[in-house]
Amino acid sequence: MAESSFEDNVDEKQAVQRLKRGDIGGLEFLISRYQVKAVRAAYLITRDVGLAEEVVQESFVRTHRAIRGFDETRPFEPWFMRSVVNASVKLMQKSARQVLVGDDADAALFAEFISKVESVEAQVESIEVQNQIWDAMQKLSSRQRAVIVQRYFLEMSESDMAKESGTAIGTVKWLLNAARERLRTLLSERSDE
Amino acid sequence: MKTDHMKPVLDAIARRAVPEDTDLMTAIMVQLERRPLMNSLRARPVLTLLLVLLALALLSGVVYAIGKMTGYIPGIGLVDQSTPLRVLAEPVTVTRDGVSLTVEQVVLSADQTVVVYKVEGIPAEAYESEGNPANAYGSEGEKSGESSYSSSIAVPLDETPDVSQTSIERSGICFGNENLLLPSGILLPLQTGEGSGWSSGFENRHVFGAIPEETNEATFLLSCIPETTSGKLPENWEVPLRFEPAPSDMNILPVADVRLSTTLESQSAMTLEKVIETDDGYILVGKFRSIGLPEHAFAYGERKFLTITDANGQAVEATHANGIDIDAQFGEFGLAYEIKGKQHAWPLTLTLDDIAVLFYQQSTEFEFDTGPNPQVGQKWILQPNAQLMGYSIHEILMERTRDGYIFTIKSDPDVLLVIPEIKDFPFSSAGGGGDEFGKGETYFHIEYKGEPPSGKLIIKLSDLQATIHGPWYIQWQPENISAPP
């Protein structure tokens, strides 16, 4: 996750405390702070803005209900984003638009694909690259997209991902590797075209 | 691909689809307002009060919050000892018009501030509340004898500036807003707490957020004496507090994990996780999880208090242990019991017979026609023949009031509460009462800001709460006792 300032953390902690007391103002603060990032994360998994907004709305409503059980000593964002990611995956799994995963990993070829683009800035600005990655992302399973989003968009460490999902770090590594492998294959196919 | 490469690409993809000015605030607030139960309590103080009353009967002194269970101070509860503890330098009393407020103890740890305070000398007439609807809903008499509460399930009733006044607020009953004011101007609000009362006073153990290490002063603020009639007693209490390092000989008891070898758990729904050995007994800390319950059932409290028996089947005296913070998620609740004595016929068996559950967001509907021009006071007896999560809703007495409707609902005996709504007509305020007597009769009233809906209506019944019968049990004995043969 991106680092936030001390003041931000204090504000966030106070918002959580207010919400725990039933003060809806606390939720308003958290919505203002995280809604855009959450919708974007959900969109990367659901591939549908409407669905993503629905997922995030529901996640905030669930947060309102579940905040009592939230450990204030921990940051809010990973806890909340886990809810968004899980809800997005669940929604997608219901829709059965999935692609089966590979079971091995090798990030090298993936990196090779990216190296074909001259610079990081160029990659970002290149609509073509974005489209290629997005197309490839859409062919991943929702669970694979979720781990990619957690790791690379939300910038969670593997250990944080494991902690937040309550799974072993090995499982997270496996999921990530499988997702990367699949993405690598898809991108590799495209770049050979 | 390197992480720092992938991030901007994903950012760019997401930004193309989701603009920076995306605003879900209104949609979320509308969704929350439509929630009928716990999560919209703030906007509905009447309902809140009634659910608090229900909670009082259901729940123990266990506080459901998060805490690092590192040490236990009698009278204070669990404390995080990762940083040096501080305490109140000396008790402070403020007396005004014969009413005294004494802050007796404060313990400051890395994660929270616990304040124990007492109010004495409240005259009986300060509680006079003629026409106070709170009494009509069952709170009368609480002040005549001893009472106790745990506010952990309920949101505080004290702050409702952004909603229209309810009948309770209009009646001028003070709810007593509490804060700790730091020299920096930061207000730490009340997080949770418990307390007990008697005819002329009460004592509370209330928990606030952590106070920074460098801050050794604060002011305890109490807007007014809770539950008294506004204006009858002094208001806006301020008690200056000074803190100092805790003495080295402060009695802090260790909190030990319960090893599996010392428990024989019958069902994984109920677990025992921590034990605190006190001077004259033990405090046992555990948790109940919604495992093995009917689908959509979320456990939220003990319906009957847990009982403890020894190896000979004899009852062991046990009381709820206050101040034990337990990491309980939605669908879980904590258990914390203190047993007296260290000489028992081991192992002890902890038995939980009944729990209360919420069938979250499960609903059923039926149609009803009030006719074209229903009058205030007009009543209808509905026999919906409805089933909700396996429970029968037998009969509903529906009465038109000036602002809405009152529903008296007769259901199966295990039903504690069911929430009626009129579909597509979200109410502006509501309240109701659960069944504490096992008759399955509950009531609920809903009100609207404008003209209440009438004609052909769809009545929606949802969020049913019910008693689920066990038993669930655990056996436990101290580690230094030999295992039973």
Image: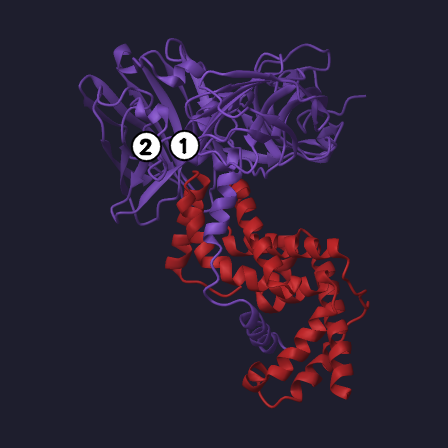
Q: Quadrant location of residue B107? A: top left
Q: Which mark is residue A168?
A: none
Q: Which residue is mark 2?
A: B177
Amino acid type, callout 2: Asn
Nearest the eye: B56 or B453: B453
- Residue A150 visible in the snapshot: no
Residue A182 in picture, x, y percent from top left:
76, 72
Q: Residues within 10 Å of mark 1 (few under 14, many from 20)?
A: many
Residue at horizontal 60 percent and vertical 90 percent from the top: A118
User: Which quarter of the rendering shows the C terminus of chain B?
Assistant: top right
| Marks 1 and 2, the one that precedes in the sequence | 1
Q: Which residue is mark 1?
A: B156
Q: Quadrant location of residue B407? A: top right
Nearest the eye: B338 or A64: A64
Q: Colour of chain A?
A: red
User: Which chain is painted in purple?
Assistant: B
User: Which quarter of the rendering shows the N terminus of chain B?
Assistant: bottom right
